[in-house]
Amino acid sequence: MTTDPRDGPQPASAPSSAPSAPASATLADRQAALVEALTAGRPVPEGFDGFRFEAARVALLRKRAGEVARQWPMLAAGLGDRWKQQFAAWAAARPTQGSLRDGWDLARELAARRALPAVAAAELAEREAAWHYDGTSAPRSRRMPAVRTAAGAVAVQCAGRVWLLRR
């Protein structure tokens, strides 16, 4: 076959440098293992420096604690100096569900253990009255009146407004 010089230079046939499907799956598997190890307490994947990995994991937990504190300010304030440590211990083996849901789950767990500070109990009762959250799906606003209690705090929701009743 002859080539026309006007067609320009023809590329040389070289082996493909694109990754094959199994190599891509292996990379995806390694990435998934890394994310699970960083966020859900799984073992450190092979080939990663343990010290650097732990530094990254701690940094992610601190970032997560800050995001949850913005959604749940009274929960963070009620725990005070213990907030970051308490949250990190709770979240270390749990993948994030988002800062609103993470704070909600932690507050419920603390309430069940009778370790929820009073200001955080009021915050939890208000959220429980205003929103429906079953612990698995995303929270959605309540349409009907509701009364909810949390660790001694009582909140009433009617017509989209929430009132906290003091004892």
Image (spheres, rainbow, N blue to C red):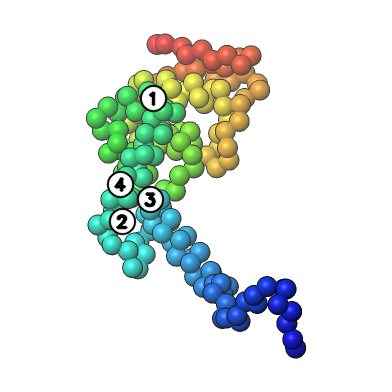
Residue 53, numbered label: 2
Tell me the residue at 32%/31% (across/down).
115
Three-letter amino acid code of the residue under disc 4: Val
Q: Which residue is mark 3?
A: 93
Q: Earlier in the sequence, mark 3 or mark 2?
A: 2
Seen in the image, is 14 located left or right of residue 150? Answer: right
Looking at the rendered structure, the kind of residue marked 3 is Ala
Q: Position of residue 92 (x, y in %)?
A: 35, 48
148 in relation to 112, above or below: above
Which comes before the other along the chain, label 2 or label 4?
Answer: 2
The label on residue 165 is: none
**Mark 1 or 2 closer to N-term?**
2
Q: Amino acid at mark 2?
A: Phe
- State the separation of the CA atoms marked 1 and 2: 29 Å
In this rendering, the label closer to the viewer, 1 or 2: 2
Q: Quadrant of residue 30?
A: bottom left
**Amino acid type for the residue under numbered disc 1:** Pro
* Closer mark to the observer between disc 4 and disc 1: 4
At 33% from the left and 40% from the top, the residue drawn is: 62
Residue 165 percent location from the top left of the image: 46, 12
